[in-house]
Amino acid sequence: SAVISQKPSRDICQRGTSLTIQCQVDSQVTMMFWYRQQPGQSLTLIATANQGSEATYESGFVIDKFPISRPNLTFSTLTVSNMSPEDSSIYLCSVVEGGDTEAFFGQGTRLTVV
Amino acid sequence: AQSVTQLDSHVSVSEGTPVLLRCNYSSSYSPSLFWYVQHPNKGLQLLLKYTSAATLVKGINGFEAEFKKSETSFHLTKPSAHMSDAAEYFCVVSVPWGSYIPTFGRGTSLIVHP
C-alpha cells in the first residue's frame, strides 16, 4: 500500500496570499487526485493529476485558482491562489496504485484563511 | 459516470446495539466499493473494500458490508457499536475502467450513546 506524506499539515494564511501543498508518495503511481473537504462536508474532487499531462479539473475548479504540478510519478503540488476565507478547508492528496482501485490518502492539509 | 448516495446524514445508536449505515451506488460498469472512516481531526482510514470477489466483505474493527447488485447497495454493518466507532463514514465508488476516480458519498455521522 502507498504511503503518502502531505505538507504542511495545517496553516493559517492571510487573504490574498497563496499556499502550495506538497504530496510525496513512497512508490511510483500514475494517478493522483486532489480533493477538498469543506467544514462538515464530504470530499469534492478538485482535479486529477497524471504525470506527463496537464491536470484535469472538475467543474467549478480552475487552473488559475488551483494550479497543480506533477513533475514525476511520486510527487505533486497543489497551490491555492489568491486565497479568501471561503478557501478554508482540508485539502487531501490521494493516489490509486496500479491495477488496484483502492485509494490511499494523505493526512490532509487543514487551511484557515483569515 | 458513477455516483454514490448515503441515505442518512446522521445515525444515532446506543453502545452495544447494531449499526447500519446505508449506501446505494450507481455505475455504468462493475464497480469497486469502499467504506472509509474519518475520526475527528484525523485522516481517512479504509474500513473495507469490495472488488468483485466475495459479496460479503469483512473489514477492520468488526465492520462488514454486503454488495447487493440487484439492489445496487453496499450497506455497512456492525453487530455491536462501541464508543470509539463514533466518527464520519464515507461510502466510495470507483470504476475499474477509465479513470479510477474515487467518488465520495456525502458521509454519515455515526453517534454512539453510552
Image: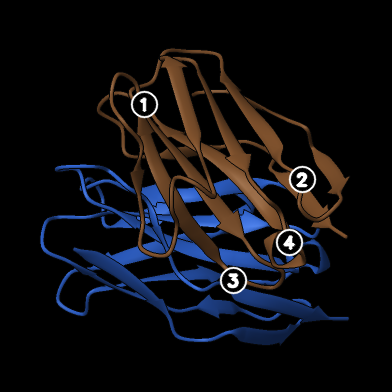
Q: What's the amino acid at mark 4?
A: Ser
Do tag 1 and tag 3 residues touch (Cβ < 8 Å)? no
Residue closest to the eye, B41 or A12: A12
The answer for how far apart the CA atoms under marks 2 and 4 are is 8 Å
- Residue at 29% from the left image edge and 69% from the top image edge: B3
Q: CA distance from mark 3 to mark 2?
A: 49 Å
Residue A84 is tagged as 4
Picture quadrant of residue B55: bottom left
Tell me the kind of residue under disc 1.
Answer: Glu
The chain carrying label 3 is B
Q: In the rendered image, which quarter is residue B103 located in?
A: bottom left
User: From mark 2 to mark 1, how far is it between C-alphas?
Assistant: 34 Å
Q: Indicate the colour of chain A.
A: brown
Is label 1 or label 3 in front?
Answer: 1
- Are the residues under badges 4 and 3 in a single subunit? no
Labels 2, 1: front one: 2
